[in-house]
Amino acid sequence: MCERDGLERRRLLGVLGAGATAAIAGCLGGGTEGDGSEDGDDEQAQVYEPSIEGVEEGPVEYTRSQRCDVCGMPVTKYDGKSQIVHENGQAAVFDFPGCLFAYKVSSTPDSPIQGAWTTDYETGSDDIDAMEAHYVLITDKEAAEDPMGIEPRPYANRDDAVAFLESWEAEELSPDEDIIVGLDEVDMEIAKIYRKNRLPDE
């Protein structure tokens, strides 16, 4: 192999490596989501808009071409897909419930939410009513090992949420300490646990 071929090969590998890094950083906003650090990409923080229109009734069917309306990652790549449908027929889809939280506290539609769905953490596949779900607010990103930093744990059944919390040894958390919440209780402070770098400063 001549020196020129070696340089070209290294340049190609560098480009491929940069692309892979960018893909992994999708939900991370340039830094690690949910870690409370200040070194993330501040330009990622914004107010979000739904990408789907003309929905008569939810839930919307997920497709491989859909991208998360908060982080831009493919919605069906992981098992956390979620969505919100507004009464005016607009809808937004997400790859994880952390992005659902971010949209809920920082989105533009004046139209009320008609319905919302997320993936049950117990099964990893069942769509459940996100408005009725019980979200466990874990915060230890090292123990969670989630693909995109850290995520709340949604459960259709509160007993399952409590059982998970009791088995979660990384943190001393109690269901009596507002660690299990409903979507209506999610505010900017809670959403920033999971998507701080993608939310505006208050």
Image (cartoon, rainbow, N blue to C red):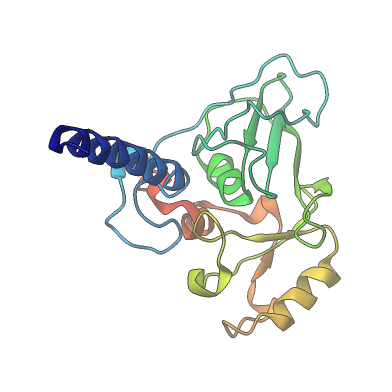
Q: Which residue is rendered at x = 58% and y = 48% of the image?
A: 101
Residue positioned most to the left: 3
Q: Nearer the viewer, residue 86 or 154?
A: 154
Q: Which residue is rendered at x = 46% and y = 55% of the image?
A: 192
- Rendered-image quadrant of the N terminus: top left
Expressed as whole percent of the image width and height from the top left, the position of residue 197 reads 38, 49
Q: Nearer the viewer, residue 137 or 111?
A: 137
Q: Which residue is rendered at x = 64% and y = 71% of the image?
A: 179
Looking at the image, residue 200 sits to the left or right of residue 193; the answer is left
Q: Quadrant of residue 86?
A: top right
Indicate whether 77 appears above or below 147: above
Indicate whether 98 appears above or below 4: below
Is residue 84 in view? yes
Indicate whether 37 appears above or below 95: below
Residue positioned most to the top: 54
Looking at the image, residue 133 sits to the left or right of residue 176; the answer is right
Expressed as whole percent of the image width and height from the top left, the position of residue 96 reads 62, 48
